[in-house]
Image: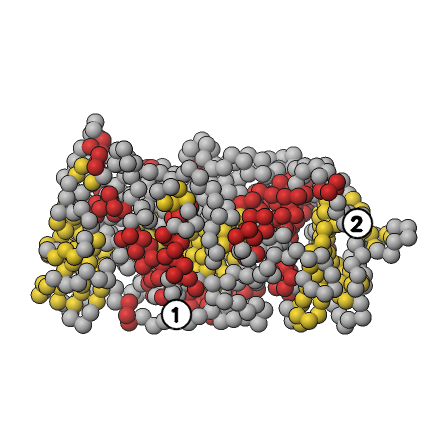
């Protein structure tokens, strides 16, 4: 092959008319060698020193007709851990810009740049070659890939900008776990990208009513050595090693030419055609190379001092704001460029619609700490591609000042753990929760509105991949993580859960009815709050993690969705479908602006009432022992925005039944029950909104003296939802 100097841009391996250009950033290397392998990646066939260096980018061009070369790098330079350098040319390294891997990563001592058993630990030097145990990179010509079609807007989808989450319902799911046990699809496609593209799965998601799927990490990742030693694996995937590579284990290998890139794009196209957007959970805060005792696989061997944040007093040690051993140095312009290039690739080539950033506070750290004006946020804001997609932050890390809920710039939404904890505690029966609950129902304006942000800034959730499932919140008071091999010391200590007298599953019918009611109570609170709701996949059919609140390493039926179809599962699924349909029908549930007007017949409004139908007073708000509340929302109907409607939600978290009186809202009449949690049978909640009777349910109705407003007895720990129309309007 003809070798020429090539170009320093673009970074990575790029195809042109006559061959392939290779460009690799390393500020401190003394030499870089390109290693070419055969198509299988098993045999090295050539080495080419990269002699040209421009602005710290090493580059070389190979004239070749093979536009799918398999390759890796060897990078030499000082091995001086105290100075932050860990170069070791004996280690084959992955290209940070690789688009595809060939072969699998195999855990082996040769991956470590030091002698694992040496008394000096990482101050020693290991000269064994790791190439036999490393995946290799493969050149990919992305210019031949057709653009991904945008999402098809469904009839019930609100009109919104591409980066707007207002009106969406997010569904957090795992690529493998969602279809691994789905008997109705081809066994070869279960647990793969193509599994999510199957009509059975798409039909399910459409019938459920969700508008976005948020996929747990799909960047190429590996399992940590300590997990493999325990015969476990990193199931969640928060251990990224390649920011451009779709994880190969989610590829359907039954096809003649399994291709993770095309299969991922097929999945996105299929979801888009079903009217569902795709968000990726991305991990740019740390990498799979761990701390000073971790392996040398990519960044650590290419330029450790540039890619990672190191302790200024001794650069042998890594700053660990992630809890995963290292922290990526986003402050370095080339590292920031890597992240931005990766994000654009997943939007422009792979077709995704937005991102959820794991431990996002790490990305906003400057020398003085977290800064919502940090370079990363500025780069995102001005980017013509990324500023137009959906951006969600997990607004914390474990470093100093890392908890930043409400502290992100405009254009960002944030996971709201305050919502999660408040809703769990209110329905658990904790005292003094009413003011906090009202703030969360209102869209957490106390956290977001001060910065002129909208109500879609809050991503409301009760459960996520991390923690108990909704089923387990009402069955376990303690975590049961024994299968993780850490004596249940891992995972959150405080879950704000309650077993209601019996730990785990039970045959007690009355206890199970209460637990089912509490699940429905929390789901209703989630779907009827201002902001953007996120539902954890499986919660809609009662999936259990067996009390494990940190199931990150359980690649088995604990995490895999149960597709059995019991009457109880069908009942809960139908309840969730109805909740989502109600949310879509009443636009007042997802207004962009925070609502500060009183409920009225003239526009969007919100009012709070005690269970007697009287407005809440300061005294009532401060009564810590009160565990009941009513609220009324007014606003337009999606099908007819000029038609004012009202929603009345009655909440009883008390341990005894209480009588609620409907408030008198001028201009509205005839409250009709849409949904309630009084009973679990189908007739209890499947209430058609066109039914004209005042209360089409087998519940006694009473009227207080001199009060024309009806009263309704609510069971302990239950709720009711009503709607009303303007007087004289046509239902």
Q: Secondary structure at mark 1?
A: loop
Q: Is residue 15 left or right of residue 376?
A: left
Instruction: Identify which residue is drawn at 14% across, 60% down.
Output: 60
Residue at x-position 67% and y-position 38%: 432
Where does residue 103 sit, x and y in percent of width and height? 25, 54
Q: Residue at x 20, y 32 (%)?
A: 123
Which quadrant: the C terminus? Answer: bottom right
Q: Residues within 10 Å of mark 2 (few under 14, many from 20)?
A: some
| Of residues 274 and 386, the one drawn nearer to the viewer in this rendering | 386
* Contact flag, marks 1 and 2 (Cβ < 8 Å): no
Q: Where 85 sits versus 195, above or below? A: above
Residue 660 sits above or below residue 65 on the image: above
Q: Which mark is residue 614?
A: 2
Tell me which corner region of the image, top left, top right, bottom left or bottom right, holds residue 187: bottom left
Left or right, 337 with reference to 492: left
Query: Closer to us: mark 1 or mark 2?
Result: 2
Number of numbered markers: 2
Image coordinates of residue 627 in percent, x first then y, are 71, 41
Where is mark 1, residue-wise? 148
Residue 714 visible to the viewer: no
Determine if residue 165 is in view.
Answer: yes
**Quadrant of residue 120 within the rendered picture:** top left
At a point 50% along the width and 62% down the height, the residue shown is: 164
User: Farthest residue toward the top?
Assistant: 119
Q: Which mark is residue 209?
A: none
Residue most extreme to the left: 2
Q: Quadrant of the N terminus?
A: bottom left
Dot 2 falls on a residue whose secondary structure is loop
> Quick one: which residue is furthest to the right in this view?
706
Mark 1 nearby-residue class (10 Å; few <14, some 14–19, many ≥20): some
Which of the pair 713/5 is nearer the observer? 5
């Amino acid at each position: 092959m003809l070798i020429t100097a090539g170009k320093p841009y673009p970074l990575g391996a790029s195809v042109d008319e006559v061959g392939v250009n290779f460009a690799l950033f390393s500020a401190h290397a003394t030499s870089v060698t390109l290693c070419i392998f055969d198509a299988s990646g098993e045999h090295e066939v050539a080495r080419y020193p990269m002699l040209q260096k421009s602005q710290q980018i090493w580059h070389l061009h190979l004239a070749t007709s093979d536009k799918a070369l398999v390759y890796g790098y060897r990078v030499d330079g000082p091995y001086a851990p105290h100075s932050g350098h860990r170069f070791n040319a004996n280690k084959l390294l992955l290209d940070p810009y690789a688009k595809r891997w060939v072969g699998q990563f195999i855990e082996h001592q040769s991956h470590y740049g030091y002698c694992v058993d040496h008394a000096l630990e990482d101050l020693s030097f290991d000269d064994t070659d790791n190439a036999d145990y490393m995946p290799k990179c493969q050149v990919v010509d992305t210019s031949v890939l057709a653009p991904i079609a945008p999402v098809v807007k469904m009839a019930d989808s609100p009109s919104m900008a591409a980066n707007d989450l207002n009106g969406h319902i997010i569904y957090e799911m795992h690529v493998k776990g969602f279809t691994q046990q789905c008997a109705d699809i081809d066994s070869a496609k279960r647990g793969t990208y193509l599994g999510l593209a199957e009509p059975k799965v798409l039909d399910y998601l459409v019938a459920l009513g969700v508008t976005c799927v948020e996929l747990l990490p799909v960047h190429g990742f590996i399992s940590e050595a300590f997990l493999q030693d325990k015969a476990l694996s990193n199931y969640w995937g928060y251990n990224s090693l390649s920011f451009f590579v779709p994880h190969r284990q989610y590829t359907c290998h039954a096809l003649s030419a399994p291709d993770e890139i095309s299969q991922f794009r097929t999945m996105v196209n299929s979801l888009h055609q079903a009217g569902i957007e795709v968000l990726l959970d991305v991990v740019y805060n740390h990498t799979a190379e761990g701390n000073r005792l971790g392996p040398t696989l990519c960044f650590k061997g290419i330029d450790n001092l540039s890619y990672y944040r190191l302790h200024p007093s001794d650069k042998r040690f890594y700053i660990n704001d992630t809890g995963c051993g290292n922290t990526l140095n986003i402050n370095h312009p080339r590292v920031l460029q890597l992240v931005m290039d990766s994000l654009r690739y997943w939007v422009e080539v792979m077709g995704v619609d937005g991102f959820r950033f794991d431990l996002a506070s790490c990305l906003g750290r400057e020398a003085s700490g977290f800064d919502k004006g940090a370079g990363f946020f500025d780069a995102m804001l001005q980017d013509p591609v990324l500023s137009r997609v959906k951006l969600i932050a997990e607004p914390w890390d474990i470093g100093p000042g890392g908890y930043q809920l409400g502290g992100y710039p405009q254009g960002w939404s944030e996971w709201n753990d305050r919502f999660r904890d408040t809703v769990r505690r209110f329905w658990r029966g904790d005292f003094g929760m009413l003011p906090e609950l009202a703030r969360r129902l209102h869209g957490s304006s106390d956290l977001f509105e001060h910065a002129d942000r909208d109500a879609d800034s809050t991503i409301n959730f009760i459960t996520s991949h991390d923690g108990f499932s909704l089923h387990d919140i009402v069955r376990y008071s303690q975590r049961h993580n024994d299968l993780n091999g850490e004596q249940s010391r891992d995972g959150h200590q405080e879950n704000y859960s309650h077993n209601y007298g019996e730990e785990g599953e039970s045959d007690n019918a009355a206890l199970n009815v209460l637990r089912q009611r509490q699940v429905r109570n929390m789901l209703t609170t989630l779907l009827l709050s201002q902001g953007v709701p996120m539902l954890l996949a499986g919660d809609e059919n009662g999936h259990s993690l067996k009390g494990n609140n940190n199931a990150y390493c359980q690649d088995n039926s604990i995490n895999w969705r149960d597709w059995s179809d019991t009457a109880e599962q069908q009942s809960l699924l139908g309840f969730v479908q109805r909740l989502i349909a109600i949310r879509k029908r009443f636009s007042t549930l997802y207004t962009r602006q925070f609502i500060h007007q009183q409920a009225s017949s003239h526009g969007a409004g919100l009012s709070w009432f005690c269970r007697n139908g009287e407005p809440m007073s300061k005294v009532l708000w401060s009564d810590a022992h009160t565990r009941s509340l009513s609220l009324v929302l007014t606003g337009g109907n999606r099908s007819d925005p000029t038609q004012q409607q009202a929603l009345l939600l009655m909440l009883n978290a008390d341990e005894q039944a209480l009588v609620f009186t409907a408030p008198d809202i001028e201009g509205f009449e005839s409250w009709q029950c849409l949904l309630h949690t009084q009973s679990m049978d189908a007739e209890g909640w499947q209430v058609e909104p066109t039914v004209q009777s005042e209360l089409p349910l087998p519940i006694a109705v009473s009227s207080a003296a001199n009060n024309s407003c009806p009263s309704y007895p609510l069971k302990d720990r239950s709720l009711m939802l009503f709607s009303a129309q303007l007087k004289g309007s046509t239902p």
